[in-house]
Image: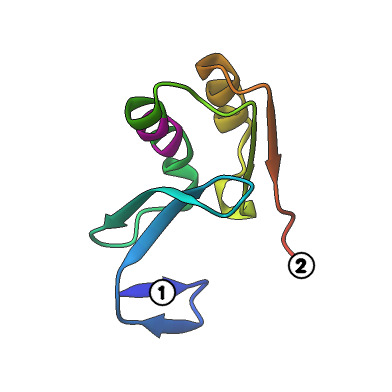
Amino acid sequence: MIVKDNRDTFYGHKICLTAGKSSLVFDCTVFEGNPADSTLAVEMIRRLKEKCGTVPEKVAMDGGFASKKNVKELKNYGVDEVFFQRSAV
């Protein structure tokens, strides 16, 4: 089950896609349960480096991944620029 902000409950699986600027998907991860997005950012880049041998210069992610810790860890991993989508509240 995936619960969105105590609103609706969805049945299915949470997935993370890693894609390039051409929209080519490099990696797809299917998670069991509903882990917080903020705990997944570094794992996605680690998997990309493992599969492709390098990390991207720039990374853009949904606002759920945003945290100062993630920015610091991604930059330490070799990512030059990190962008997060601001929530539309």
Residue at 35 percent across and 54 percent down: it is: 35
Magenta stretch?
44-48
- Is residue 47 one of those drawn in magenta? yes
Instruction: Give x and y (percent) for residue 77.
Output: 50, 18
| Quadrant of the rendered image containing residue 17 | bottom left
Instruction: Give x and y (percent) for residue 38.
Output: 49, 45
| Quadrant of the rendered image containing residue 78 | top right
* Up-down relation of residue 37 to residue 87 (above or below): above
* Amino acid at dot 1: Val
Q: Residues within 10 Å of mark 1 (few under 14, many from 20)?
A: few
In the rendered image, which residue does mark 2 sit on? 88
Disc 1 and disc 2 in contact, CB within 8 angstroms: no
Residue at 33 percent across and 31 percent down: it is: 51
Instruction: Give x and y (percent) for residue 18.
Output: 47, 47
* Amino acid at dot 2: Ala
CA separation, marks 1 and 2?
Answer: 19 Å
Name which of mark 1 and mark 2 comes first in the sequence.
1
* Up-down relation of residue 13 to residue 41 (above or below): below
Instruction: Give x and y (percent) for residue 54.
Output: 46, 22
- Element type at mark 2: loop
Residue at 55 percent across and 25 percent down: it is: 74
Q: Nearer the viewer, residue 83 or 19?
A: 19
Q: Residues within 10 Å of mark 2 (few under 14, many from 20)?
A: few
Residue at 71 percent across and 53 percent down: it is: 85
Give left or right: position of 84 versus 11: right
In the rendered image, which residue does mark 1 sit on? 3
Give left or right: position of 78 versus 8: right
